[in-house]
Image (cartoon, helix red, strand yellow):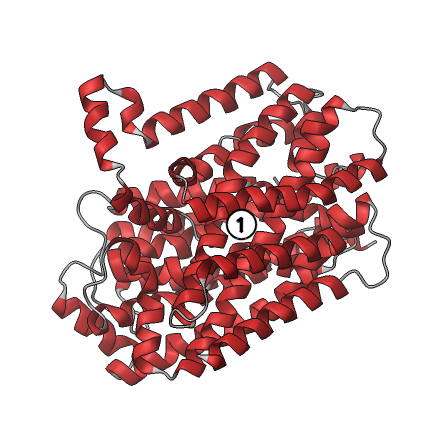
Amino acid sequence: MTAALALIALAALAALLLGVVARAGRDMDLEQWAVGGRGFGWILVFLLLAGEIYTTFTFLGASGFSYGLGAPVYYILAYGSLAYVIAYFLLPLVWSYARQHGLHSQPDFFVRKYASPTLGVLVSVVDLVALIPYLVLQLTGLGIIVTAAGYGAIPRDAAIWIGAAIVTVYIMMSGIRGSAYTSVVKDILILGVVLFLGIYLPLHLYGGIGPMFEKIAAAKPGFLVFPASGQSVAWFISTVLLTAIGFFMWPQSFAASYTAKDARVLRRNAIVLPIYQLILLFVFFVGFAAVLQVPGLKGGDTNLALFKLAAQQFSPAVVAVIGAAGVFTALVPGSLIAMTAAMLLAKNLIGLARPEATDDQTVALAKWLVPVVMLVAVYFTLTGNATIVAMLLVGYSFVTQLFPAVIASLMPRNPATPAGAFAGILVGMVVAAVLTFPSARCSPPCRKRSATSTSASSRLPRISSRWSSSAR
Amino acid sequence: MKPIHWLAVIPFIGMLVGPAVHNEVDPLILGMPFPLGWISVWVVLTAIIMAVVYLIDPANREDAQ
């Protein structure tokens, strides 16, 4: 237990130090804080994009999804790679426009392209509705990881408060640089841990990847192929295409492209990131390895498949190392999300009420909004708010609604008017919400029935389905 | 779109067509069930294709100057 506590504390301390050091004597004005002076080379941009892509999901969700549902998990590997293909063409255009006009947030892009601050407000709202639950998800994941890795010796709530405080301090001080620098340690740790687990466990327990899948196929027929209905092949194709489109519509990934020093940096990452994405394959292997080893996990508990199997196979010290890597997967993405939310609040919502604000005033406000955003997220995390859980389910669909307006605006002659873009995003959101929550579109008796199904017991599986619906 | 950019369509077709036409465990690819193995191979091919696009794309040379 002490080993776990020491290692996880060390990881947290390392994150704090690295995050603060990232500042390295720079004056954190708006340009530095929000977009790293637009001078990041391909490695820093890679770390930012990869850091944002491999989150607590990599640890808990992907393995839990493999364990619980089998074949449908394959889609995650497919859509990420295709998203990078889209990014090869999309991000350089976004980047050069952002550089030309000195943009700092995703709503800035819409405000400038459509000459409409009102559209900026709508996009800010979409972004916040997607970002805050996503931050809550990271903190919830942090709590689960720390509890599992410390065998319950580390109190969950304390871990969440400490994690939130660390992120707040280094983001206030170092801005986006803090996220990029802490990613270095995170990516090394996660790479080591995941490759080790994904190779060792199948080998040790089954004698290899092939024998493992043969045994699973024999024990659970149909588990390793797409089912005939539900998450079928048709589901696979449509989900891969839609999520690939929405991938870079997430405001933190969209705005991370602003940090690049030139367009080639972004194109080069379209080559490197698909390969890096293969790490997820080893996470799948861990989840599949757990299927026959720790059977019987249900609902939200499937997210613990990796830790249950690790606890069964390794000493607490090894589990603690896994936990330390897990802490980073919550803190690093959490930091970028918090910064993005604070930035767009300061510039695109509050900034609207004080158009005379200078850049220095805007960045000062953004910095002080970081603790506010974190406090809100911690509050929702500790209270387990049901609305937040519901919002998680639609977050990805909501940000995807921004795609048509972005593409139209990048054409030589924008075929969309500001009103058209506004209406398109709004209607898209309503449709997504109605389709996600059937209770919103049926008569009272039906509503009553679905209300009972949203009881506390079904909340964890719902969270897990959010993890399942996005590898971010 | 320059002609070389059309190469980028290939990963979309390649990635999605495998599980669509052969949704069976066997034959295993690199020890993985066919759909998973197919997707993994296409992840690598996607990177290779994008590397080719990157190298030929004149945009990357214009930026260098």
Label 1 secondary element: helix
Q: Quadrant of residue A203?
A: bottom left
Q: Residue at x 26, y 39 (%)?
A: A455
Q: In which quarter of the image is residue A165?
A: bottom right
Q: Residue A399, position in %: x, y?
A: 51, 35
Q: Mark 1 points at which residue?
A: A85
For this rendering, which residue is in front, A374 or A127? A374
Q: Residue at x 74, y 28 (%)?
A: A351
A17, above or below A36, in the image: below
- Describe residue A76's horizontal placement relative to residue A456 as left or right: right
Q: Which chain carries label 1?
A: A
A240, above or below B29, in the image: above
Q: Residue A80, position in %: x, y?
A: 47, 53
- Describe residue B37's horizontal placement relative to residue A255 as left or right: left
Q: In which quarter of the image is residue A162?
A: bottom right
Q: Residue A265, position in %: x, y?
A: 70, 56
A313, above or below A381, in the image: below
